[in-house]
Amino acid sequence: MEPNATARSIGLLLAAGSGRRFDSTAPGRKLEQLIDGQSVASRALGTLRASCDAVLVAARSLTAPIAQEAAAMGVKVLVPEQSSLGMGHSLAALAAAVPEHFPQAETLVIALADMPWIEPATVRELVSASRAGNVIAQPAFDGEKGHPVVFPASYAAALASCTGDTGARDLLRQNADHLRLVAVNDSGVVRDVDTPADLPPRR
């Protein structure tokens, strides 16, 4: 993949989790569940592609359905070596790849593949808020903090140091004075797929 010198907003999609709470016997199965004919992960990927200049995906393997779909679209897919140790390792791998592939990046959108109901307009609003104030922008719906979280690209090195299963949570806490909560009218920012009960009834 040649460096993209024009992309400014970069979506980092975390799709390498095991989803043990959904189905402990079939890692990754929850991301393949269909909502209106489209998989959970595919919907999340579509949101980022519609709202960011470019996307990087962390997947469990190159043969995972979301990895194959992303690759077919020309989206760069990474398979983090330590993804089994928690999402922080996947986030670190994606953030570390940003300077090489997107040297002019301005904002990094940290998105979870098990959150399929976020509207692209919401992501664009968060990106604009981050750029306008050079701040970390996090959505809030009815007072509840949600995802995705948008970081200025200057945080790439710090994000590349994330470990464990808390993602960027520690980084958010350490930089609370640079965090801006953005109230949004989008319940998708606080709605994920954790167990089968979180999926809508089959029609």
Image: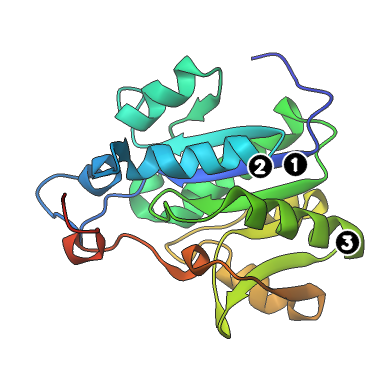
Residue drawn at point x = 52 percent, y = 43 percent: 13
Find the distance from the CA under tag 2 to the CA under tag 3: 19 Å
Q: Give the x, y percent position of residue 117.
A: 44, 55
Which residue, given by chain and number where applicable, does mark 3 sit on? 134
Residue 51, numbered label: 2
Judged from the image, the secondary structure of the residue bearing numbered disc 3 is loop
Which residue, given by chain and number where applicable, does mark 1 sit on? 9
Vertical side of 132 occupied by 116: above or below? above
Circle 1 crowding by C-alpha within 10 Å: few under 14, some 14–19, many from 20 = many
Vertical side of 81 occupied by 155: above or below? below
Instruction: Give residue 149's quadrant in the image.
Output: bottom right
Q: Nearer the viewer, residue 117 or 161?
A: 117
Left or right of 117, for residue 122? right
As shown in the figure, which amino acid type bears the numbered disc 1?
Ser
Would residue 81 be visible to someone looking at this image?
no
Q: Name the outermost residue toward the bottom.
A: 143
Q: Is label 1 or label 2 in front?
A: 2
The count of marks equals 3
Vertical side of 4 occupied by 43: above or below? below
Q: Closer to the N terminus: mark 1 or mark 3?
A: 1
Find the distance from the CA under tag 1 to the CA under tag 3: 13 Å
Would residue 4 be visible to someone looking at this image?
yes
Judged from the image, the secondary structure of the residue bearing numbered disc 1 is strand
As shown in the figure, which amino acid type bears the numbered disc 2?
Ser
Find the distance from the CA under tag 1 to the CA under tag 2: 8 Å
Left or right of 75, for residue 27? left
Judged from the image, the secondary structure of the residue bearing numbered disc 2 is helix
As shown in the figure, which amino acid type bears the numbered disc 3?
Asn
The answer to the question of whether label 2 and label 3 lie on touching residues, with beta carbons closer than 8 A, is no
